[in-house]
Amino acid sequence: MSRPWPDFRPGPLGALKAWWRRRVPRRVDDITFVPPASSHQQEFETPLASAVYGLDFQLRLTVVWRLDLATGLRHNSPKSAAIHHVLQRAKEISGKAMLVHHAALQVQLGDELATERQVPGTHVWARAEQVKVTVGDEDLEMARKHIELLRNSTFKLAERDVERAEIRYLRDEVLTDVGTATIWWLQRNGYQVQEAVKLADHLAELVKIAQREPATHWAESLVSSVERAMPELEDVHRKDLRLHLVKALSVYGGARVAAEFADQVGLPAGEPHRNGHV
């Protein structure tokens, strides 16, 4: 029985050509190589520097990395590159943190290190998971003592600044002459004119004493001279000024001169003023 329609089925040669067209792309651009996904991970634990030398956090995390072969770059030890890169990112953050802030640091590192970044110059992309930051009890106690010392030093330095400011005020603005000294006394003692008259000789003597050239240490004279050159210098910047001066002295005069200057102007013990570093 014959078919009512023509037979359009390809012969053996036509079938082979159709199969070949399906298998081979028409253009080179149609050929796309997709490298297989590659992911690795490694648990790692290490001390992590804090803002105080010698006091470290304890860091434990899992470094996760993958290789991007499409970059054309290579690295002979992808695992080391990934771990080193993640630790460098962690140190940039922890180096500004105190040990007492370890809980907040753990949250910050967990957030920052979760972002995957390419290790510069390599085909490695790395991030971190399960970040855990701990602190030893002894180190934490030392960190608290360090903070207390800094607080006390700051208070003492502030008190000395206030005292120096009062002395400068009395010497440079009050005890300049008998008239100014007398008015100053009247304002603070209920304008008792008769008492002020009785004290006139004493006030005159105080003016003479205040206007004598004091036998001050060279360090105090240096600070006073620089501060007089900058009359608009704010009190909050006076410590910075002394730190810059002690840095210059340590570079050009040596550690002994810098230490003598620091002691005379009231910089706290342990202030970083040696070897030219501030």
Image (spheres, rainbow, N blue to C red):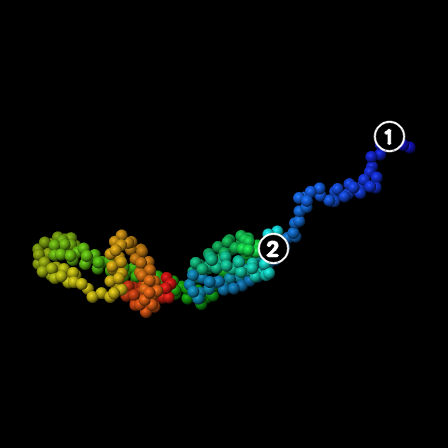
Looking at the picture, how far across and down is residue 193, in whole percent? 10, 54
Percent across and percent down for residue 39 are: 62, 55
Does residue 212 appear anywhere in the picture?
yes
Depth check, mark 1 against mark 2: the one in front is: 2
The residue closer to the viewer here, 178 or 156, is: 178
* Amino acid type, callout 2: Leu
Mark 1, residue position: 4
Q: Nearer the viewer, residue 233 or 59?
A: 233
Q: Residue 176 lies in what quarter of the image?
A: bottom left
Quadrant of the image containing the N terminus: top right
Q: Quadrant of residue 218?
A: bottom left
Between the C-alphas of marks 1 and 2, the distance is 62 Å
Q: Residue at x 21, y 59 (%)?
A: 167
Badge 1 crowding class, 10 Å Cα cut-off, few under 14, some 14 to 19, many 20 or more, is few
Spot occupied by residue 254 in the image (x, y as percentages of width and height): 33, 68
Q: What's the residue type where badge 1 is placed?
A: Pro
Residue 67's disc number: 2
Residue at the far right: name it: 1
Could you tell me which residue is drawn at 60 percent across and 53 percent down? 72
Q: Can residue 148 be seen?
A: no
N-term-proximal mark, 1 vs 2: 1
